[in-house]
Amino acid sequence: MNERIQDGVNEIDYSIEQELADVKYALDKSSIVAITDRRGTIVNVNKQFCKISGYSEEELLGENHRILNSGFHPSEFFKEMWKTIGSGNIWRDEIKNRAKDGSFYWVDTTIVPSLNEKGKAHQYVSIRNDITNRIEAEQRLRDSEEQFRLITENTSDLIGVVDVNGDFIYFSPSCETVLGYNLELMKNSTITDWIHEDERISVVDEMRKIMEKEMFSSQIEFRFRTSRGEYMECETKINPVFDNAELVRQFVFVARDITERKKSERVIHHLAYHDPLTDLPNRRLFFDRLFKEVENAKQTKESFTVMVLDLDRFKYINDSWGHEMGDVILIETARLLRKSLSEYDLVSRLGGDEFTILLPKISNILDVKQIAEKILEYFKIPIDIWGNSYTMSCSIGIAIYPENGKEADVLFSRADAALYSVKKSGRGGYALFTREMEMQSLERILMENELRKAIELEQFHIHYQPKISFFREEINGMEALVRWQHPELGLISPERFIPLAEDNGFIIQLGEWVMRRSCAQNKKWQQQGLPFLRVSVNVSVKQLMEPDFVTKVETILMETGLESCWLEIEVTESTFVDVDDATSILEEIRSLGIRISIDDFGTGYSSFSYLKQLPVDTLKIDRSFIEDIDTNEESKAIVKAVLTIAETLGMDVIAEGVETREQLAVLHEDGCSQAQGFLFSKPLTEDEFEVYLRNSQRYISKNDVKSEGFN
């Protein structure tokens, strides 16, 4: 058994070495590669570098890139380059170089700093591609309008030439075919006439910056109006055309239709700020608006009101009638709340049966009570669900700015305290916050005390849930999930103790324990000859905010002996909003060789443009989009869009919460290759997972994926 595993490992090592050799061969054949030390001295070049520069390897080694300086670029150009790479960032631009024989050539250049363990650059790898032909072609285009026209007549991109006032001089035939206008109509117009009015100023400003030489060119997104009155979203490159005095006399606009891509972005953006079930604003949007409302109120001295609302006995509805019935109740609740409030009020769903309401500029207690009573009255009206009459009930907690708090988190917690008071006193009503409500319940106090003793008393345990690659027919990872087995209270749900641990800061100690324990266990399994798998550990916002978090991670890896490549850290999308320097922290972690994944993707993300800048390796699609993917076309379309975007960015995707063969079949059809869920295995104890590993290596057949799913 061990020999077969070792053979498999050797085969993988050989495959990796071969892949690296292939990459090096491809680079040597296609790109110009050089390595310099931190002072810029050349220490390594490939044959392509020697070929294009005309210098031999011996002539180049020990020199710096001044040997190739053409004198074309100002000193500020190189100062900015050194500033960028010296700070550990990747630099990209186009450079004009001089070869040994005095000829000039252009290269598209990417310089990647190699960082040491302190995060400092100790050498730089530059990858260049010869773009001389393209640059010369662009120069010829600037010199010859006729040549430019011949080329543009054969492109589907929109190409236009305008003077410094924006008046059209030339537009490609594609402007007629794509936009639907007669070219004669466009002749006597300016480019801004066809741009959406909200974006005209920004386009004119980009042209001004180019004219004043604040930038050489510009890439900007804006909308073009079509003959149908619709707007086509375009990604547009603006290049200047200079006269003999080096003054801008014309601009060349090259616009590409990105309407479909923007639609996908808007889907993701909407998901980031809205609850997929009710389509109400979600937690992230609510708190974003609440923080802004507080800041505005501090300036204007105005008041506003926050309400927190829970459905009464919602758990009983779910347990008795099923989650489908519960979803219908939640959708109906959203409808009633919208009906009860004005268009200026914000109603959102935080999760589960918890809703929030923000009432701007409403602070008069009588008005607040009237709104609360109106909501309660609406809830008393019976509703028809599947032919049955049902009457809902809710409880409402209320806090008013600034009387009950001057900060967003304080206001929310006090509205929540008022809600707890209503529930404690019998539900079905409302309460305004009072100081007496700040006293925590006995249950919460006891739970918090027990929580602090749980690690010392070894009440916490880790369960492991496998991740499956059903294309490669193997287990390719596992997620570590903490469980609390209390001797008197029994198994306590993470939904109960994790929020409490977040509130009181215990999550830092607990999170460190989970990471240390799971890393140690993974190393133990490796030493026992079991398959090498990456273990995923969830990390909270508060953990990331700890100044020594990265050091703690390094220490855990060192003390447990686990290599960094076998650890993955999972964070939620809100991390990048809640932690100011989350990106730099995760980049530092990633530089250690640890992978980063976004958990519950689709429940809090902002934009595609922002996502592609994040240090992320994997997206885990939230289970809310998977649970009805086989019956809901919208969910299927959303998952497909995420898979497409992830593929574009070179990210892996894992589908969470896969429970049925039908779900798996749809995921397989859409190109998703990795999944996690009860269909494959529930979370298992350490002993159970070890048995699972021993009995389950490469156990998935292709027929399972294509037809029957998993047992």
Image (cartoon, rainbow, N blue to C red):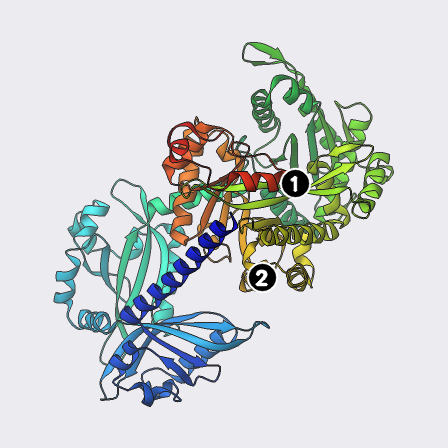
Specify whether 186 is left or right of 378.
Answer: left
Q: Residue at x 65, y 29 (%)?
A: 353
Q: Is residue 32 above or below residue 603?
A: below
Q: Is residue 211 above or below residue 264?
A: below
As measured in the structure, the alpha-carbon distance from the residue carrying label 2 to the one carrying label 1 is 30 Å
Precedes in sequence: disc 2 or disc 1: 2
Q: Residue at x 18, y 69 (%)?
A: 141
Labelled disc at residue 259: none
Residue 250 coordinates in the image, percent (x, y)? 25, 68
Q: Is residue 649 above or below residue 436?
A: below
| Of the pair 562 and 524, the residue shown nearer to us | 524
Residue 575 coordinates in the image, percent (x, y)? 60, 52
* Amino acid found under the numbered disc labelled 2: Ile
Give the residue pinned by disc 2: 589
Give the residue pinned by disc 1: 687
- Res. 347 image quadrant: top right
Residue 128 coordinates in the image, percent (x, y)? 33, 73
| Of the pair 656 and 577, the residue shown nearer to us | 656
Res. 245 visible in picture: no
Residue 701 coordinates in the image, percent (x, y)? 41, 35
